[in-house]
């Protein structure tokens, strides 16, 4: 976050606004609607808004746009706060709720009525839709459009007092039913909704429409640059109209292209469906593109911030491959994650020339960072290696183990495979090897080269731990393009198995992410682990395995 910022079109606009004296201090905001958990698209908006405020020594507000009582919940408010903080951002004292402005918004609606700029419409929803026109046809004025100010004031008051059922009347701005911009065709600004709000309870039975609230909320908070996604470009003239009519502070709205990520859905409606229909376990299931899911999976916050910085902001349609995010995760974890050894598919190895003893070997916790110290690894006569580190009939380029071949055991000796033992089905069940006992931490004295290095665990000391191998949740690049996105869920997105691990693994704490050497990065699950039985989530593989598949 302390790097020199990369310029972009938004920074150019801000620079001009500061140079011209239009604004003195940059104020941005992140305005989530508390109707779901935050996802990686929101992270882009968070990094952008908080990042701009920090780099211009301004401030960024966290504001909950909670104008819709039906779908909003306190649980989401708390989860959103946790996620924004975890990403590394701080709104200080600037925490706001649209619902705190309901009284002010109501007063502004009255002000518009008094100025002859708003009226109560009593058409049915169908009539209103029909009279709105289309992109090619102008709309038709409502028969109620010329109601007197006094009548409008009285009806609006009675709407507020709960005298009418839902949908009986709406308050509309009086702008222009023939405008080429549909948003200016007398948009609804207040509706009757007999619904309980998670913060204001039953105090209101009329609620402002999002479009009547958003711009004025920004104005009240003296936001200078109101940054939103492209679909609000056509709403900007409406927001500007409201603040001009009301004579209040005018923020500059700037639109940018939303993040789309391959193999991912980001609509909150779909994410909610995945949870409620139990296609995943919860909002923070490690396969979810939510910030809480990524945290639980072991993605570092820094990796998400770096990713958002790397992809930049623009106006063009942006489609980013999931591998770009995964690569950001690897870049951070490669530097920070301690190394351990664990075997997922064990094959027994007996070192025939090794005495019946236990030796304590020293292994660095990180190959490039000696300050992270060493750990002790028990070595003994019987080991496990990974099944696919052995081939009975290996091709030339296979540098691992085969009959008569040599390989180095990571942090230990060079061994040679002398014998292959099979069961009655012809399956290889054990290898008999000899170790070159002069090669601990040294190359062979005779100068022979041993290229391959494989990981291992001591059979008698290995601990069995549960591992969850996560993979992409969808197996189609653009799940939204499928007839039904649920049909392209990846059936192999979760595989639960056991690993045999070096004993040090049991000291890992909840939330720690480690590299299982040559296998991948794994994070101790924060919910299903106990001190005696940690559960490891695979954060990411060591390499992009999907690049080949495509
Ligand atoms: P919906 O309207 O489907 O409920 P939303 O994604 O617009 O969902 P909000 O809670 O309104 O959800 O979003 C908060 C902020 O995050 C908005 O300013 C929005 O522009 C931004 N945002 C949402 N999705 C993305 C995305 N994919 N890329 C970038 N910014 C996003
Ligand atoms: Mg939205």
Image (spheres, helix red, strand yellow):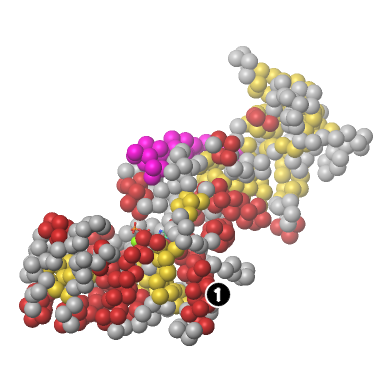
Q: Is residue 26 above or below residue 294?
A: below
Residue 486 is a magenta residue: yes
Q: Quadrant of residue 464?
A: top right
Q: Residue furthest top?
A: 424
Q: Residue at x 43, y 74 (%)?
A: 225
Q: Closer to the camera, 332 or 464?
A: 332
Range of residues picked out in magenta: 479-507
Magenta-span inclusion, residue 61? no
Task: Report the side of 216 relative to 177 (left or right).
Answer: right
Residue 109 in the image: above or below residue 506 = below
Q: Quadrant of residue 1?
A: bottom right
- Image quarter for ligand 1 equals bottom left
Q: Quadrant of residue 62?
A: bottom left
Please give the name of the residue rendered at 28% of the width and 64% of the height, measured from the top-left corner. 181
Q: Is residue 450 above or below residue 295?
A: above
Which residue is tagged 1? 55
Identify which residue is drawn at 32% across, 59% down: 35
Image height of 169 relative to 295, above or below: below
Q: Secondary structure at mark 1?
A: helix
Side of 119 where 251 appears, left or right: right
């Amino acid at each position: 976050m302390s790097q020199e910022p990369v310029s972009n079109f938004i920074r150019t606009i801000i620079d001009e606004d500061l140079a011209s004296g239009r604004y003195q201090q940059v104020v941005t905001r992140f305005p989530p609607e508390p109707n779901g958990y935050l996802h990686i698209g929101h992270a882009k908006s968070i990094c952008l808004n908080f990042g701009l405020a920090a780099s211009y020594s301004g401030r960024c507000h966290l504001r909950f746009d909670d104008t819709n009582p039906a779908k909003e919940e306190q649980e989401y408010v708390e989860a959103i706060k946790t996620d924004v903080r975890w990403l590394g951002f701080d709104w200080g004292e600037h925490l706001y709720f649209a619902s705190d402005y309901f009284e002010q918004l109501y007063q502004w609606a009255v002000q518009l009525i008094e100025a002859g700029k708003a009226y109560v419409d009593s058409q049915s929803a169908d009539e209103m839709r029909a009279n709105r026109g289309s992109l090619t046809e102008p709309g038709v004025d409502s028969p109620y459009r010329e109601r007197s100010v006094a009548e409008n004031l009285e009806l609006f008051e009675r709407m507020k007092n709960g005298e009418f059922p839902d949908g009986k009347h709406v308050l509309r701005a009086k702008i222009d039913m023939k405008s080429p911009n549909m948003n200016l065709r007398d948009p609804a600004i207040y509706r009757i909704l007999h619904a309980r709000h998670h913060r204001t309870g039953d105090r209101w039975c009329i609620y402002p429409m999002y479009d009547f609230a958003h711009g004025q909320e920004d104005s009240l908070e003296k936001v200078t640059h109101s940054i939103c996604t492209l679909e609000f470009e056509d709403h900007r003239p409406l927001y500007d109209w409201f603040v001009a009519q009301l004579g209040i502070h005018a923020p500059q709205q700037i639109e940018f292209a939303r993040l789309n990520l391959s193999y991912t859905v980001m609509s909150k409606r779909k994410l909610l469906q995945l949870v409620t229909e139990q296609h995943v376990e919860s909002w923070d299931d490690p396969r979810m593109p939510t910030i809480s899911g990524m945290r639980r999976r072991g993605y570092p916050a820094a990796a998400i911030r770096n990713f958002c910085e790397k992809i930049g902001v623009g106006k063009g349609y942006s489609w980013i491959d999931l591998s770009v995010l995964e690569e950001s995760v690897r870049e951070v974890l490669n530097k920070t994650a301690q190394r351990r050894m664990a075997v997922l598919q064990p094959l027994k190895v007996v070192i025939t020339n090794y005495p019946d003893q236990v030796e304590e070997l020293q292994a660095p916790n990180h190959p490039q960072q000696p300050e992270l110290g060493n750990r002790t690894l028990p070595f003994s006569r019987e080991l496990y290696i990974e099944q696919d580190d052995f081939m009975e009939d290996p091709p030339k380029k296979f540098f691992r183990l085969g009959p008569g071949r040599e390989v180095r055991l990571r942090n230990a000796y060079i061994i040679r495979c002398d014998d292959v033992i099979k069961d009655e089905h012809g399956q290889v069940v054990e290898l008999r090897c000899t170790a070159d006992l002069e090669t601990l931490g040294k190359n062979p004295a005779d100068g022979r080269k041993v290229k391959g290095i494989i990981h291992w665990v001591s059979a008698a000391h290995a601990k069995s731990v549960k591992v969850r191998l996560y993979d992409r949740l969808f197996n189609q690049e653009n799940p939204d393009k499928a007839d039904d996105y649920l049909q392209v869920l990846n059936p192999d997105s979760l595989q639960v198995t056991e690993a045999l691990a070096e004993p040090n693994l049991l000291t890992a704490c909840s939330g720690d992410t480690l590299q299982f050497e040559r296998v991948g990065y794994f994070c101790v699950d924060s919910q299903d682990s106990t001190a005696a039985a940690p559960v490891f989530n695979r954060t990411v593989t060591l390499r992009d395995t999907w690049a080949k598949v495509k």
